[in-house]
Image (cartoon, coloured by chain):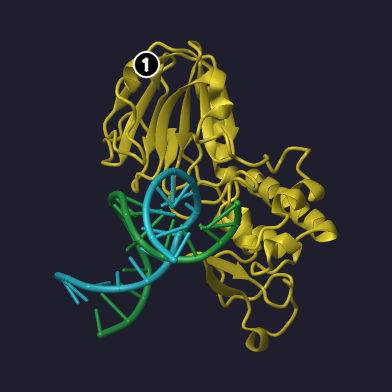
Chain colours: A yellow, B green, C cyan
Amino acid sequence: MPELPEVETVRRGLEPLLLGRRLARVVVRQPLLRWPVPAGFARALTGRRVEALDRRGKYLLIRLDDGRAVIGHLGMSGSLATRPTAAAPDPHDHVLFETDAGARLTFHDPRRFGALLLADAAGLASHPLLAHLGPEPLDEAFDGPALAARLAGKRCSIKAALLDQRVVAGLGNIYVSESLFRAGLSPRRLAGTVTGARAVRLASAIKAVLLEALESGGSTLRDHRRADGTLGYFQHAFAVYDREGLPCPGCDCDLARTGGIRRLVQNGRSTFFCAARQR
DNA sequence: AACAAGACCTGCATGC
DNA sequence: TGCATGCAGGTCTTGT
C-alpha cells in the first residue's frame, strides 16, 4: 500500500488513538518481518507513553517517553489499524498493540515486507534507514530548483530517479506515474534533463498529487486501510496508474488512434503514461 | 559511481 | 478442477 499519502493517512489516524496514551499490552505473534522484530520489543514498549507520532518519507516514527522510538514501515502490504475486539486473529496479524484506553491496533502484513524496529530517538535522523532520505516533498523548501539539484547529472530515467528515496522521500510506483503525467513529462526522459521550468512543473505536480491523495485518505488497491479500518479512495482518481488501454483524462483524442494510456516496464516495475501528453 | 537485477513473501488473476 | 505463471503499493543487497 504505502506511499507517502497512505503512511501519512495512517499517522493522522493513529494520533487520536495513541498520542499521550500508554501501551498497556504489546504482543509479537510473528517476528519475521523484513527484519526480525527485535527481541524484547514487546517488553520495551509495555508501559511506555507515546509522546509523538511522526513520519519521514514512508517511515512511521513513534516516539516514546523513555527516549526511544519505534521505526515502522508498511512494506507493500502492511497496515496498522484497529480491529473489532471480537474479531478472531488473522494469520497475518503479526503485532498487536493495546493502549490504556482500550484501543487495539494490529500490524497486519501478508507479505511481511514491512518492519518494526526500535531506535534511540536522539539519533533518529542518522539511523541507517533514515539518514539518506531525500527531502520531504510537501515541505515548502521542496521546489523546482531543489528537485533539479537532486536530479543533476543523473542518467537514469526520471521514473527511476523519483522512485529513489534519496532523491525525494515518499514517492512510490503509483504517485510517480501520476506526478509525471500531471507534469507532462515522459517517464523515459533522462533525469538530469529535468531542469528549470520542467523541474518547477514536476515539483508542483508532485505536491498537488500527494495533497489530493491525502484528501482521499490515500489509495486502496487491496491492503491499504486507515487507522480506523476504513479504506482510501484516491484509486478512483488515478489519471494513468493501472489504466492501460483506457482513455487519457487530459486528451480529447480518439482512443482507437492513440491507444490511450500505455504501460511500460522500467527497472522491473510498471509505468503508466500518455504518450501524447508526456514528453 | 551509477545503475540494473535479485532477493525477500504471500495472494490473486489469468490461462492452459 | 488443478496447476503454472506472472504480477502486485518497497527497498536492501548483490552484480555489472
User: Tag 1: Cα neighbours inside 10 Å, few (<14), some, or many (≥20)?
Assistant: some
User: Where does label 1 land, which residue?
Assistant: A44
Q: Which residue lies furthest to the right in this view?
A: A197
Q: Which residue is drawn at 63% across and 88% down?
A: A256
In the rendered structure, the residue with mark 1 lies on which chain? A
Instruction: Give the amino acid at mark 1.
Output: Ala
Q: In which quarter of the image is residue A266?
A: bottom right
Q: Residue at x 50, y 11 (%)?
A: A65
Q: In this view, does A236 lie above or below A3?
A: below
Q: Is residue A145 above or below residue A127?
A: below
Q: In which quarter of the image is residue A200?
A: bottom right
Asked whether, in this view, residue A56 is left or right of residue A79, the answer is right
Q: Is residue A30 above or below residue A212?
A: above
Residue A87: horizontal and vertical position, in percent? 30, 35
Residue C2: horizontal and vertical position, in percent? 14, 70
**Residue A159 in view (yes/no):** yes
Q: In this view, does A86 lie above or below A219?
A: above
User: Looking at the rendering, in which quadrant would you find the C terminus of chain A?
Assistant: bottom right
Q: Residue at x 46, y 33 (%)?
A: A72
Asked whether, in this view, residue A223 is left or right of residue A52, the answer is left
Residue A239: horizontal and vertical position, in percent? 65, 64
Q: Which of A228 and A242 is in front in this view?
A: A242
Residue A48: horizontal and vertical position, in percent? 44, 12
Q: Which of A69 and A81 is in front in this view?
A: A69
**Residue A217 in view (yes/no):** no
Q: Nearer the viewer, residue A236 or A41?
A: A41
As helix, strand or loop, the secondary structure at mark 1 comes to helix
